Image: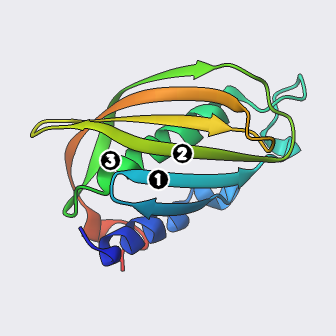
Amino acid sequence: MNQSHFDCLVNIYKNAPINQIYNPSMKLSLGECHIEMDVLEKFHHSGHILHGSVFFKMLDDAAFFASNSYIDDVFLVTTSFTTYLTRPVSKGKIISKGKVVNKNKSQIIAESILYDHENREVARGTGIFVRSKFSLKKALGYL
């Protein structure tokens, strides 16, 4: 893979409609992904803590894009993702780091860890990703 492929994936992520809400930033290299996002009160549940869906999104996104860094023609899809939430978060920045741990012809397995603004682990996840039929070239923001 080359930097052009990574740049295209970063641009696709930036242009995804869901990310207009969360406004995350992403860095990508082969088999690794780093995503940062500010925790805002509008992402809290009524207990004044970050909603679990945001934890999942950050973990899945980092593992997904670390995996898709190996594939340059189609989007991957998440077929399974196990999430462990270990610490609440209510403010600051969260950082998700994903990396591929196993890759074969039929699937890619990646792990991700979510950290709070004090670099404490707050969640982790493992996902399985497979090829879809959706061309990357048809994605919003593909360069």
Who comes first in sequence, dot 3 or dot 1?
Answer: 1
Which amino acid lies under the numbered mark 1 shown in the image of this protein?
Answer: Cys
Residue at 78% across, 33% down: 50
- To which residue does mark 1 refer? 33
Q: Is residue 27 left or right of residue 66?
A: right
Identify the disc placed on residue 67: 3
Identify the disc placed on residue 97: 2
Q: 89 or 23, which lies in front?
A: 89
> Element at badge 1?
strand
CA separation in Å, label 3 and label 1: 9 Å
**Mark 2 near mark 1, Cβ–Cβ under 8 Å?**
yes
Which amino acid lies under the numbered mark 3 shown in the image of this protein?
Answer: Ser
Q: Is residue 28 left or right of residue 21?
A: left
Q: 81 or 102, which lies in front?
A: 102
Identify the disc placed on residue 69: none
**Vertical arrangement, residue 15 with respect to residue 77, above or below:** below
CA separation in Å, label 2 and label 1: 6 Å
Which class describes the residues within 10 Å of circle 1: few (<14), some (14-19), or many (20+)?
many
